[in-house]
Image (cartoon, rainbow, N blue to C red):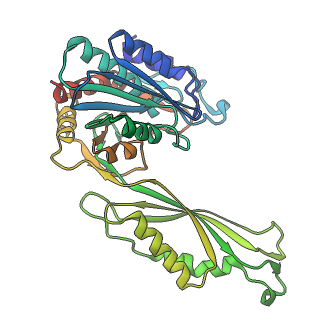
Amino acid sequence: MSPVLELTHDLIRRRSVTPEDAGCLPLIAERLAVLGFHIEHLRFGDVDNLWATHGSVGPVLAFLGHTDVVPAGPESAWASPPFEPDEREGLLYGRGAADMKGSVAAMVVALERFVSAHPDHPGTAGLLLTSDEEGVALHGVREVVDHFAKTGQRIDACVVGEPSAKAKLGDLIRVGRRGSLSGTLTVRGIQGHVAYPEKAKNPIHVLAPALAALVAECWDEGNADFPPTSFQVSNINAGTGANNVIPGDLVALINFRFSTASTAEALRERTETILCAHGVDFSIDWHLSGHPFLATPGGRLREVVVGVCRDLCGIDPEQSTGGGTSDGRFIAPMGAEVIELGPVNATIHKVDECVSVADLERLPDLYEAICERMLR
């Protein structure tokens, strides 16, 4: 069994459902310490984080990943136990195989190879891992970056191991991500009997025209790098459960995935303006998960990753800013160039999550080649 496959097996066996790490980080830290990596265990709240570095000068190339996974769901629905790695027909099955224990294992193996071959390499090679990416993401990379600001730690370039590929390794890389702005909207009405609507105020009826306006609004046109900003309602809840009671209030969950053509501040203001224009009595609790970020075309890391995909995978990768969010949103504001490169994402978070064994065994080659081109 290859080193990357063996380590991935070992990581999958550890039931690290977010925010639990289940021993993944100590295992990796021990391996890297043997090769002279400086190890920092950073625990914030109930979350474990690992920062391992080899070298002490710039530039700093960091690989970023997470060891936590989403719950498996009904284990009886899986063809094989989700926390017991199983290889079938060229695929490795297990929770986290693609998202993202396979990538983490590939990063570790690539760094081991690179440092063994070049113990006196220029710059610094780093690995940043957290057990709080799939959950609320408050005490993971978000808090690590705050810690770095206090200690003066820099990151110049960052490769995120999120599963980015569509059909085969190297066919798509993420060169940026949209921002995510969520809101918990509370609409205040007056509870009453449905037979006497004149004595009540139905918050559902009040919100309906305003909600239609929000859905129809063109928030921006996007730009060359990002699609237009999108607005979605993910949940609406109102009422007592009785069909003869007008509810007293309504709670709706809303979300913007926004491009660099808009700002979070402008989206908040426009939303509240539309609600006010429709006479809605409301309050909104806003939560900004992350700003949009983009690796500038012509940037060194972007060019290197594209070149590695061409040379090692024989593919000119699509350069995308689509998808959800990643921990790269916390690294980019440090001034780092951030690129995401990982395996196929077709089964992430699903029952019978899996990764191609062939792709997994090639992934360390890509990460090692990035080290070679960035730090030699």
Given residues 9 and 193, the one toward you in this image is 193
Q: Quadrant of residue 357?
A: top left
Left or right of 267? Residue 85 is: right
Identified at 33% across, 23% down, the residue is 53
Q: Is residue 34 above or below residue 273?
A: above
Q: Quadrant of the N terminus?
A: top left
Check the image and name the residue furthest to the bottom: 198
What residue is drawn where x is 31% and y is 15%? 112
Q: Nearer the viewer, residue 214 or 29?
A: 29
- Quarter holding the C terminus is top left
Q: Quadrant of residue 237?
A: bottom right
Tell me if I can see residue 344 in this picture.
no
Could you say where residue 91 lies in the image, as x and y percent from the top left? Answer: 44, 25
Residue 67 location, x and y as percent?
A: 49, 29
Looking at the image, residue 56 lies above or below residue 112: below
Query: Which residue does the image show at 21% across and 26% down from the upper left?
Result: 123
